[in-house]
Amino acid sequence: MPKDASIVASSLAGPCALLHQAGVALADIEELLTALRDDMRSDGAEAMISLSSFVTFLQSAARQHGNGLFGWLAGRDFDLALLGPFGETVLAAPDVRSAIRLFCNAFAVIQSDSVMTLDVRDGEAVVTYRILNPRIWPRAQDAEFTLGIIAALIERAAGPGWRPSSISTEHLPHASEDSYDSEMRCRVVHGAMENTLRFPARLLTLPLAGKDRTEFHGRADVLVSNARMRDRSLPLPLRVRNEIVRGIGHGACGEADVARAVGLSERSMRRHLSAAGNSYSVILNTCREDMARNLLSVGTLTIEEIATRLDYSDRSAFERSFRRTAGTTPARFRQLICDMPVPAAAAPL
């Protein structure tokens, strides 16, 4: 695996087909793909490309396509068989729960530095997706591309009349409210902590095409084992960063929490990080600064809300930390990147 975040190159096929269907010139599509081809690497039988470059490709492709919901549309039309053994095994799942669980547990096989989870809360199933590298931003099209793939998977079992209960995205809208309503067919909340798709939990038991549960679980176990090995093979500073990003905002990014997640004692983690020229506190502060820059681009969030999301004790603590690393206040930084007036609730102290 390359050290930088990666994704299987076959993920490009669906978005490229959608561009072609929309009449985008082949020369323009080729131009979008140039940087990705230069970055392509082999990982066993799979060709991998930079996740950052893929996300940038989707952002650019949406502009070429002319539809702000390009990522969602590409995800809805995506052929999972293009993902090789991973996609074929998902399609062989006996039910919706098994298919989505495999996505969550073996996601590292097709995309690194990312997380997908499935939880059931109060009769609702919640699929959550997030890239764990905060420097990969903006990433709106990728988020909607991935949620679109999951929505299409559920629709295989639930039928074409199915619609999500709600969808949340970490980014601001990039299409009209009417467009979101007509394409996603549910309430969409923007500027959320994570990208989520909610639907009735009863749909998890709906059957899919898979008939042989034993064969499916055997193939799934191999994929999950491979995913875990890939995660464990990442350099420790990256594993620590990923666990910090997962835990921020959920009260689970303390040093003890992170050490437990990477399978080390706090003392051992400190020693190994020190040997790599790093430390938990440096990684934590870097994550917070990178995430703060992203959140400040979401103009609907107040400074207080951002401070809370980043687990600061209060707004003042966030502002002091941000000023120390960025050289300016969060409110001023927001003005510079968004060219927007500072709302009253976000005025500097």
Image (cartoon, rainbow, N blue to C red):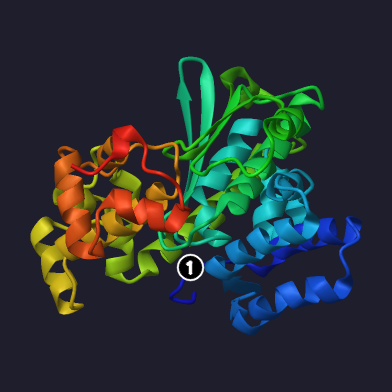
24 versus 89 height, above or below: below
Q: Residue at x 52, y 57 (%)?
A: 138
Whether residue 344 is visible here, answered yes or no, is yes
Q: Circle 1: is it few (<14), some (14-19), or many (20+) Cα within 10 Å?
A: many
Q: Quadrant of the C terminus?
A: top left
User: Where does residue 207 sit, x and y in percent of width and height?
Assistant: 72, 28
Q: Quadrant of residue 149?
A: top right
Q: Residue at x 15, y 78 (%)?
A: 275
Q: Which residue in the rendered view is the most extreme toward the left? A: 267
44 versus 135 height, above or below: below
298 versus 269 height, above or below: above
Residue at the spot of label 1: 5
User: Where does residue 62 sit, x and y in percent of width and height?
Assistant: 71, 56
Q: Is residue 280 left or right of residue 248?
A: left
User: Where does residue 24 sit, x and y in percent of width and height?
Assistant: 86, 64
Q: Amino acid at mark 1?
A: Ala
